């Protein structure tokens, strides 16, 4: 079936702004972008802007985004958690987020959810999943079921995830604020343990995303050669944030992608000092040339699943990145850095994952809050 989005402005994910064009969709792909082709079924998008569907780099569909998250997580039966994940995914798709990387949930549920969204059994975005993060005994998010304490055990956990069908390997390089009894400032694994994780993942054609907060843990992950750093907050024990220039230089030199998990949750931070320190650390990473993508860690308390656009505004503000470049971090650049050449750009042959908004989001990210239509694989889902 052919469909034409006619009469609006189109930003393809790469250019320096929207231009007048018609987007022709054939089946689940973009057939053409350009002058009117006279396709039989047309959708009037005049006065609106057509852009690629958004990509969320770091989500937890299984969390409820509220302060009682752990009690809810612990009391959920598996079927109920799957329903919770389905609802979260649907809210994301309706907000124009057509691809989501879930970086932590029970492995089997993540795979079921991905397949249910892929086959249309449930309405939701395209998922990339890590399953349960690999962590130390009692380490960050141990309750998801991924404890491992040696090179051998880490290798086995990687193999189990690949066997189950996970797309990414997530490893906890430091403790986390959401898991009592862990240490966010020190490394959870040795360099050799993380090297084993990376080697085994790469052997099996998977990439490694390492959760890391404090400098010591970030440094170990960089040394081990992980592919991506989640959060990368450079937290210090006195509640400050101080980027270590040598570590930042190492990230840039190795081309490790930083997934900064910046969200509307930052708006609730009470300390202005911490806000300005985080802003400075983000700017230092940008200035050093660290590659990035957009991510929010949605699902954690205070960060609803569909709040990607708000997080993009915060990133633009904190890191002083122009709106159009933040938009690339959530579309074309995200697709490239996640290894997804079939999306993130509106061009002939790419997936017809399309978002239609009111206003020009390349100049004003608030336009992303005015969603008018969403297409996933050519199918109108909103
Ligand atoms: Zn997370």
Image (cartoon, rainbow, N blue to C red):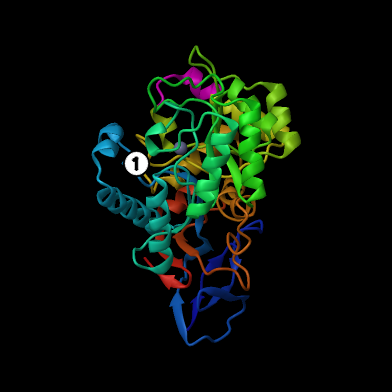
Residue at (37, 58) in percent of width and height:
94
User: Which quadrant of the view contains residue 52?
Assistant: bottom right
Q: Give the residue displayed 34% in from the left and 67% down from the top.
A: 121
The image shows residue 243 at horizontal and vertical percentages of 62, 22
Q: Quadrant of residue 307?
A: top left
Q: Residues within 10 Å of mark 1 (few under 14, many from 20)?
A: many
Residue behind mark 1: 63
The residue positioned 26% from the left and 52% from the top of the image is 79
Image-quadrant location for residue 316: top right
Q: Could you tell me which secondary element the residue under label 1 belongs to?
A: loop
Does residue 317 appear in the picture of this structure? no
**Front one among 240 and 362:** 240
Kindly tell me whether mark 1's CB lies below 8 Å from ligand 1: no
Magenta stretch bounds: 269-277
Residue at image coords 31%, 52%: 82
Coordinates of residue 187 in the picture (x, y in percent): 56, 23
Position of the C terminus, as image quadrant, is bottom left
* Count of marks, rendered view: 1
Asked whether residue 191 is in view, the answer is yes
């Amino acid at each position: 079936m052919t469909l034409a989005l006619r009469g609006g402005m189109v930003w393809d994910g790469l250019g320096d702004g929207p231009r007048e064009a018609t987007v022709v969709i054939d089946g689940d792909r973009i057939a053409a972008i350009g002058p009117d082709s006279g396709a039989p079924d047309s959708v009037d998008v005049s006065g609106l802007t057509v852009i690629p569907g958004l990509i969320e780099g770091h989500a937890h569909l299984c969390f409820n985004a509220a302060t009682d998250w752990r009690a809810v997580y612990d009391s959920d039966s598996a079927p109920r958690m799957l329903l919770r994940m389905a609802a979260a995914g649907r809210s994301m798709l309706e907000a124009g987020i057509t691809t989501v990387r879930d970086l932590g949930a029970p492995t089997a549920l993540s795979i079921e959810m991905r397949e249910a969204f892929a086959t249309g059994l449930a309405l939701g975005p395209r998922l990339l999943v890590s399953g349960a993060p690999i962590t130390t005994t009692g380490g960050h998010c141990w309750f998801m079921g991924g404890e491992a304490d040696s090179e051998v055990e880490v290798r086995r956990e990687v193999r189990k995830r690949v066997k189950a069908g996970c797309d990414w390997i997530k490893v906890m390089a430091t403790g986390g604020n959401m898991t009592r009894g862990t240490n966010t400032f020190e490394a959870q694994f040795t360099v050799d343990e993380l090297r084993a994780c990376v080697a085994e993942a790469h052997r099996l054609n998977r990439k490694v995303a390492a959760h890391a907060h404090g400098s010591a843990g970030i440094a170990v992950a960089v040394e081990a050669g992980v592919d991506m750093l989640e959060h990368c907050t450079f937290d210090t024990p006195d509640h400050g944030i101080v980027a270590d220039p040598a570590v930042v230089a190492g990230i840039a030199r190795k081309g490790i992608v930083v997934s900064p998990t910046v969200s509307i949750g930052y708006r609730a931070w009470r300390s202005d000092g911490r806000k300005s320190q985080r802003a400075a650390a983000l700017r230092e990473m940008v200035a050093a040339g660290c590659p990035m993508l957009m991510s929010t860690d949605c699902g954690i308390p205070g960060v609803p699943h569909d709040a990607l656009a708000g997080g993009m505004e915060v990133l633009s503000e904190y890191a002083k990145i122009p709106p159009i470049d933040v938009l690339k971090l959530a579309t074309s650049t995200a697709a490239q850095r996640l290894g997804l050449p079939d999306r993130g750009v509106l061009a002939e042959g790419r997936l017809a994952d399309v978002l239609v908004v009111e206003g020009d989001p390349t100049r004003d990210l608030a336009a992303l809050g005015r969603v008018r239509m969403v297409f996933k694989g050519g199918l109108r889902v909103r």
